[in-house]
Image: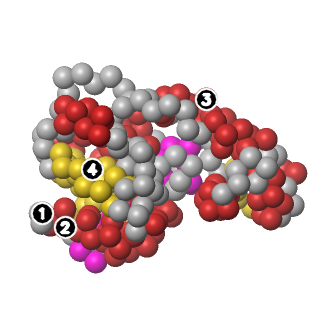
Amino acid sequence: MKLNFKQQGDGEPLIILHGVFGSLSNWNAIARRLAEHYQVYTLDLRNHGRSPHAESMTYPEMAQDIAGFLAQQGLASAHVIGHSMGGKVAMVLALTQPQKVRKLMVLDIAPVKYPDRFSTLLTALNQLSPGAVKTRADADSQLARLIPAPEVRTFLLQNLSKTAEGYRWRINLPVITRAMPEISDFPQLAGRTFTGETLFVRGGDSDYIQEKFLPDIHRYFPAARVVTVERASHWLHHEQPQRVTRLIEDFLRGDK
């Protein structure tokens, strides 16, 4: 599978992976800053953005997509950063093909199974009929019935694309809906470890990386450090972009 991507900058290769319902554009501002010192690749994962659609999206499949991307670019390895679902993809790549990952940075997700957090969002998205939508404001008003937070609606509506025939979803909504139990889970990789440098970054106002998950993190990633970005929720790279960018730069440079 040939993933859609954006490349910028020169230096050591750095791959950035977005979360569910996201796209490479979520990382544009931070990627521009990092491209001052690194060759940055922001990717659309399968069934997202402008990447191809597929009938399944397990973590091993998505990790293999990244391994294939590295091969397509002639890269033996790269630093890898992933947020949420993208963080799980990055973890699975590091655990199954560790030689391809130089340093690993995971934003606000742990290698554990999470309870369903997306049923309301999926219900709202599936109830919206893009072909019947006349304007984005119309779509926003329909989503507002189930999704009161305007910032969440704005994020989700980035996936609504206007074509000559009308609006359509850019994401593969049926497959994402069907795959959500797998996306919320983490594959069984008992005995696998990634011993390279690893940094987990959690939002101070988020409950995604709880203290009870730290043993799971260190079982898979014995060299992992965990840092907290205060005044940030799960979307820490949007809420605290300067702090997150600094953490990335310090980590990749080897600063503690």
> Relative to the observer, which residue lies in front, 93 or 232?
232
Residue at 29% from the left image edge and 40% from the top image edge: 211
Mark 2 and mark 4: Cα distance apart in space? 13 Å
Question: If you read the primary sequence from the N terminus, does the residue marked by circle 4 or circle 3 appear first?
Answer: 3
For numbered disc 2, what is the local secondary structure?
A: helix
Q: Earlier in the sequence, mark 4 or mark 1?
A: 4
The amino acid beneath tag 2 is Asp
Q: Is residue 251 above or below residue 88?
A: below
Res 223 seen here: yes
Which of the marked residues, 2 or 4, is nearer the chain's N terminus?
A: 4
Q: What residue is shown with label 3? A: 178
> Marks 4 and 3, Cα distance to the nearest angstrom?
28 Å
Q: Which mark is residue 256?
A: 1
Q: Which residues are magenta?
A: 36-50
Location of the C terminus by quadrant is bottom left
Q: Residue at x 71, y 38 (%)?
A: 123
Badge 4 amino acid = Phe
The span from disc 2 to disc 3 (Cα, nearest Å) is 39 Å
Q: Is residue 127 left or right of residue 149?
A: right
Of 112 and 182, nearer the camera is 112
User: At 78% from the left edge and 63% from the top edge, which residue is drawn?
Assistant: 136
- What kind of element bears circle 3? helix
Tell me the crowding category of disc 3: few under 14, some 14 to 19, or many 20 or more residues within 10 angstroms, Cα based: few
Q: Nearer the viewer, residue 208 or 185?
A: 208
Marks 4/1: CA–CA distance? 13 Å
- Residue type at the position of mark 3: Arg
In which quarter of the view is residue 12 placed?
bottom left
Contact? badges 2 and 1 (CB < 8 Å): yes
- Tag count: 4
The numbered disc on residue 250 is 2
